[in-house]
Amino acid sequence: MTSSTYSHKVQVCQDKTVQAELLTQYISDGLLNNEAVIITARPALRKSVWSKLQALGLDMTSYKAQGQIKLYDAELLLSTVLIDDAIDEHYFHTFFGSQIEAAQAAYGKVRAFGEMLDILWQRELHDTALQLENLRNELCKKHELTVLCTYLPNDPDHFVLQRACNCRASSLPMYALSAEESGGTLFELFGTAWNKIVDQLTQSKPASDHLR
């Protein structure tokens, strides 16, 4: 299925509590709109969001039993697609493609959220993180898919590289908080992190040239 109806939403969260609340709203909106939801997250975030969704009165056990929401452990799933610190692209597309297609067949629209990229970045597997981002963009192009990405203020470099990769690798429409909505935080983070990236690249250039 090829569609131009896809989006990549980016939001900076003040802290993990705000992140959980944002994801809870994102999932709730999808479920109530009869959309399928695919979440790949760490146990702590999954547990927090699940409790919040139940507190909203949503019958999460029923949604899960019907297959409208699927939750995966980000660490475990990442271990199955990584081979020598690189993503097995065939397995990645086969697994996630089949999950998305099954969800689309049952519910039409699909929205997703994942933390695997964040895990790779924290492990300093930067090239692998960019590879994963490119693969995710390919899924968005191929399928009618909405993806949410969240970032915490203490991870500015992660945020900049993620966004820069999006702009370079695809024409995905991206949505982010405006300066008014974020109090300027988003754009301050972007500027600060970009300067750090430029400094890092400048410092590493002689070594890179030497390796050529």
Image (cartoon, rainbow, N blue to C red):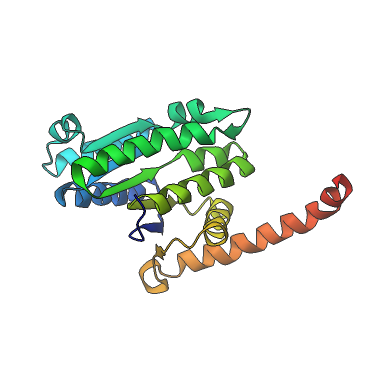
Residue 46's x, y, as percent?
Answer: 32, 35
Q: In which quadrant of the rendered view does residue 10 lie?
A: bottom left
In the picture as drawn, the residue positioned furthest to the front comes out as 1
Q: In which quadrant of the rendered view does residue 53 lie?
A: top left
Q: Residue at x 21, y 34 (%)?
A: 67
Q: Residue at x 58, y 47 (%)?
A: 130
Residue 151's x, y, as percent?
Answer: 45, 52
Residue 126 located left or right of residue 24: right
Q: In which quadrant of the rendered view does residue 99 lie?
A: top left
Of 132 and 4, the residue lying toward us: 4
Is 119 located above or below residue 35 in the figure?
Answer: above
In the picture as drawn, the residue positioned furthest to the bottom comes out as 180
Of 10 and 185, the residue lying toward us: 10
Is 123 located above or below residue 15 in the figure?
Answer: above
In the picture as drawn, the residue positioned furthest to the right comes out as 210
Q: Residue at x 82, y 49 (%)?
A: 208
Residue 66 located left or right of residue 74: left
Residue 38's x, y, as percent?
Answer: 31, 40
Of 61 and 172, the residue lying toward us: 172
Badge count: 0
Q: Which residue is drawn at 73% across and 59% down?
A: 199
Residue 40 visible somewhere in the drawing:
no
Residue 176's x, y, as percent?
Answer: 40, 64
Residue 109 visible somewhere in the drawing:
yes
